[in-house]
Amino acid sequence: MNSLDIISVNIWQTVISLLNLVILFLIVKKLLFKPVKKMIAEREEKAAAVLKDAEDSKARALETEAQWDARMKSAEDDAGKIIKEAKQTADRRSEKILRGAKERADDIVRQAKADAELERARSEDEMRHEIIDLSSILTKKMLRREINEDDHKELIDDFIQEISDIS
Amino acid sequence: MSKAGIRFRITDIFLLFMTILPLAAGIILKILFVPASDGIKITGAHIFFKIALPLGGLPITEAQVNSWLVMAEVLFFCLFMTHGIRAKVYTKRQVLAEWAVEKVEGLVTENMGEYFRGFAPFIASILVLSALSSLMSLAGLFPPTSDLNIVAGWAILVFFLITFYKMKCGPLNYIKSFGEPVPFLAPLNIISEVATPISMAFRHYGNILSGTVISVLLASALGGLTSLLLGWLPGQLGEFPFLRVGLPAVLSIYFDVFSGCLQAFIFAMLTMLYIGGAFDYEKYLERRKQKQARSS
């Protein structure tokens, strides 16, 4: 009487055991599965939010990078253009300066040449006059007589002309 | 440590204490009320008292009390595991709780299909109740699973669930399914239907009980062998059962720990397979569509 037989069937015990399992199911469901699943869902939500944030940031960063790239490229282009333009102007100006200098040098040389020519002509002329004078004096002295000065001069001129033609 | 932290720690300790308390209570109850067995005797659960009810009355036995103790343990352990659970912090117990939940859900969806995801707590409670009940014998308590009534209750619940899910595809279909493949096999089909819970209950109960029986037989055999071999030793030494030291413990690892956990797993597995097999999801969808078409 104090203990059950080794195989004993009792409806009430069976029913209680059945209810026990149902109660334990509710306990496990409400106290273990529900909070754990809620926590997992929460964490997943958080992770998704973080991931989305990261993706947004990345997209924004990429956009900024593209912008900067474009800006850099345009700046480089601008710099190239500016340099090119400056070079062109400098070239043009230096050419102009060089050309001006050359012209001036040429002018100077030409002037100098003309001056020298003029000087030479004048000195030649002078020399001729002196020779004429000299020769007229000499002839006067040689001939001791006065000849027509004008005839004389003409004569000597002819003579000198001949000489210069020959030389 | 802040005030909230201290309160948290105190609650933790209280919950852990309440988890262990039922076990201690079971041991104390056993010491106080259950007479020590004199030698080799195999009996069922000890009856504490009896409540007068029709159909044989309700005896409150060790098996009943121990299974309630298991439930209390599980209740407080669940509370402990989920105490202070938050999405941000990672504590060991939280990882453990998550692991357990996900493992059981994976097992359920793998064996029963996605439709039965809600069955995970049920399977988990079967696993934990059966395993802990069997493991009670490690503490020297009567394992509730070696009482047929306890396991039969679970098996009958499973049988109800099987029938419910078979009915879900239409009660008429359910009745018709007994006449397949040929109508005159109907008695056999009915027998096999009824045999399911019975076989489940007896499988579990028999395995756990047989472990106890073999342990008792072995202990008595080893006692006899000791007195035969070492009986010539003088005085107390001759009466001491030396061979009982050690060897039964090794067998206990198989019969109590391994067999207990294995039977829990088998019971849960069979539950999943039977309930999953009872329900034809495609047929169910078809039937629902027909119903909707008829009502609209």
Image (cartoon, rainbow, N blue to C red):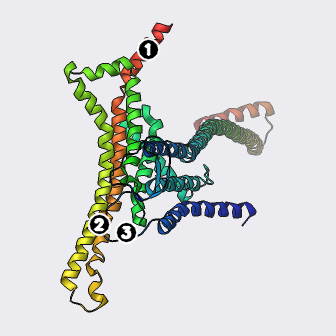
Under mark 3, the amino acid is Ser
Q: Is residue B156 left or right of residue B7?
A: left
Q: Mark 1 = which residue?
A: B289
Query: Are labels 2 and 1 on one chain?
Result: yes
**Kind of element beneath mark 1:** helix
Q: Chain of mark 2?
A: B
Residue A109 x %, y %: 69, 41
Chain bearing mark 3 = B
Q: Can you say whether B176 is above or below A66 in the image?
A: above
- Write down the residue under mark 2: B216
Residue pictured at 32% horizontal, 43% vertical: B200
| Number of disc labels | 3
Mark 2: few/some/many CA within 10 Å (<14, 14-19, 20+): some
In the rendered view of the protein, which quadrant contains the C terminus of chain A? top right
- Three-letter code for the amino acid on which mark 2 is drawn: Val
Rendered location of residue B8, percent (x, y): 67, 60
Residue on which disc 3 sits: B37
Tell me if A71 is positioned left or right of A131 in this view.
Answer: left
Up the image or down, B249 lies above or below B278; here it is below
Q: Nearer the viewer, residue B279 or B202?
A: B202
Q: Quadrant of the N terminus of chain A?
A: bottom left
Q: Is residue A160 above or below residue B187?
A: below
Residue depth check, mark 3 versus mark 1: number of the one nearer the observer: 3
Q: Chain for mark 1?
A: B
